[in-house]
Image (spheres, helix red, strand yellow):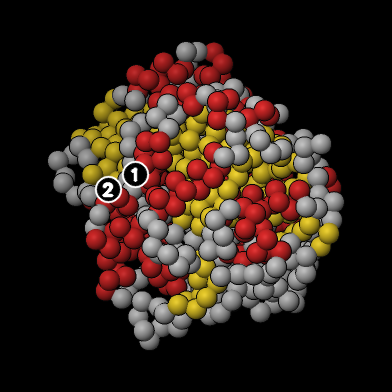
Amino acid sequence: MIYLGAGNIISPLGSTTSENWSSMLRYESEIKAYDSQRSEDPKLFLSRFNDAIEFNHRIKQCIDQSLLGIEKEKLDWARTILIFSSTKADVEQLEDRNIEKALLDSTNQFILKHFPAAQGITVSNACISGITALILAHDLIATKQYDNALVVAADNCSTFVSEGFKSFYAIAPSFCKPYDVNREGINLGEGVASAFVSSNLSLFKVQPVLLHGGASANDANHISGPSRTGEGLFRATARALKQANKKASDIDYISAHGTATRYNDDMESVAIERLGMQKTPLNSLKGYIGHTLGAAGLIETLIAVEQMKNDTVLATKGFEEAGTVQEINVFSTHQHKKINSVLKNGSGFGGCNAAIILEKLT
Amino acid sequence: MTNATPTYCHITNQHYTVNGKIVENTTAVDAQEWLKTIYTNLSLDYPKFYKMDGLSKTGFIAVELLKTAINLPSDSDDIAVVFVNKYASLEADLAHQELIEKGTPSPAIFVYTLPNIVLGEIAIRNKWYGEQQFFIKNEWPEELMHKYILTIFELNKASQIIIGSVEYFDTRMDAKLVVITKEHYRNSDVLNEIKTIF
């Protein structure tokens, strides 16, 4: 058995998982309009921190909070892998051509300095990075290569990224509307999350959940457009279910990606239809915290854990009227529902897709 | 059919090798020109190649080189592709940053500011739907990669892994890839063999 717990989230909604969770229960968001780099461009709707805390420092704050959730004396750092997940880390350092600080490995090394006995690696698989980090943690522990993993995920709302998505016409002109008939694109967000994965149940002060692992799959179709047949997402989810020894009908709730671009959300609906999961309750959290890129997979997994613990499926904030190619079970008010098993999935540039399965510990 | 030892290749600015044997040397200084030369030498006909950034071209060509020495079937769920480098997509990052400063960002450049795009290019070329990972580390993480290879086979996530380092930054390129099959993993001291390659 492999467990996931001691999770923490720092987003503009709050500095702990419970602050984020309470805000989402109140349908709150910190997504606001900001001026674009060029004043003549439309305003950008972003979920941004309104402080000047440095990127690495916020990561340290998040990890410190996760450390409060474990019995530290039971953690052997020499048997622990640190997995950092990010797409662009502190890329704004490139504005001053500060290359060393902009490197993903620099952030990893910064974290490792605090845990010198641990080994560390960074995963960078676009918007599925957080999920692939959890899969890696699970797999390394399942094969007894390590006993524990500290998984850390972070990304910033940089001009670098927003200007890029703007060039793709993928940015929403207002608040994002995942799966809605009138959706027009994404709101970028920033955030940090951290959690422990371990084969040692007694490591956790608060009861963790079971992490069954998962799988990734490529669409093998296009580097920047999702597959019309949902190929990779379908395959990744089918493989994740197989790895977890579960059927589609065992899943009580899907923590989906739902970026609110026309193509992504349609693609997800097609994959879900192919999987026979159209009736399974599903949500996207992008309307609360924006698209946090390489942090999204972990942040959304930790909110999935809160949903399991509270037997509540959150509404998809921004969703009003169904508008995907295939009908899916998405709604605009929170639903009370018994949740034992969760599917978390995601998709990203490069045609990558990933899925993991979580289960309540009884 | 399985080879007794893993197939590997190495591309640098000076030469490219397959299974340790130099196929061709060059004195060309331009990395892009050199990649195009290898592309031509391999008799490839894949126009998408010309749209790729340097990192993707390097990874793409390295996999094509492997295919000259080992059968890697197309349309497969069973081939994992795992790349590691230090600079991620820094070459494309700097190009995108310059375009932002000029006020002319381009989606054709921006998309390559994610290191895993090269994995997508390879998946599209070969119709490979399997597991993929892009790792970032300032040096080849030997111990961790050995552990990762073990997890892929132990958990039946692939029957073949293409794994190695792929770097393209500041006109310097270096790609070193090895193909490890489940049979290698079962039958031989494959991790020691990889050690000698890297």
Q: Which residue is mark 1?
A: A106
- Contact between marks 2 and 1 (CB within 8 A): the answer is yes
Q: Amino acid at mark 2?
A: Glu
In the foreground, B9 or A135? A135
Q: Which of A336 and A122 lies nearest the eye of the viewer?
A: A336
Residue A135: quadrant of the picture: top right
- In the displayed structure, A331 sits above or below A250; it is below
Residue B76 locus on image (x, y percent): 60, 40
Q: CA distance from mark 2 to mark 1?
A: 7 Å
Rendered view: B7 above or below A215: above
Q: Residue at x 29, y 38 (%)?
A: B174
Residue drawn where x is 62% and y is 59% of the image: A20
Residue B134 x, y percent position in the rendering: 46, 42
Q: Chain of mark 1?
A: A
Residue farthest to the top, as pictured: B188
| A280 versus A165 height, above or below | above
Dots 2 and 1 on the same chain? yes
- Packing grade of label 1 (10 A; few <14, some 14-19, many >=20) is many
What's the residue at 36%, 39% (across, down)?
A109
Q: Residue at x 66, y 58 (%)?
A: A21
- In the image, is A202 to the left or to the right of A167? right
> Three-letter amino acid code at disc 1?
Ser
In this figure, which residue is indicated by the disc labeled 2? A100
Residue A40: image location, x then y, percent: 38, 86
Side of A71 where A92 appears, left or right: left
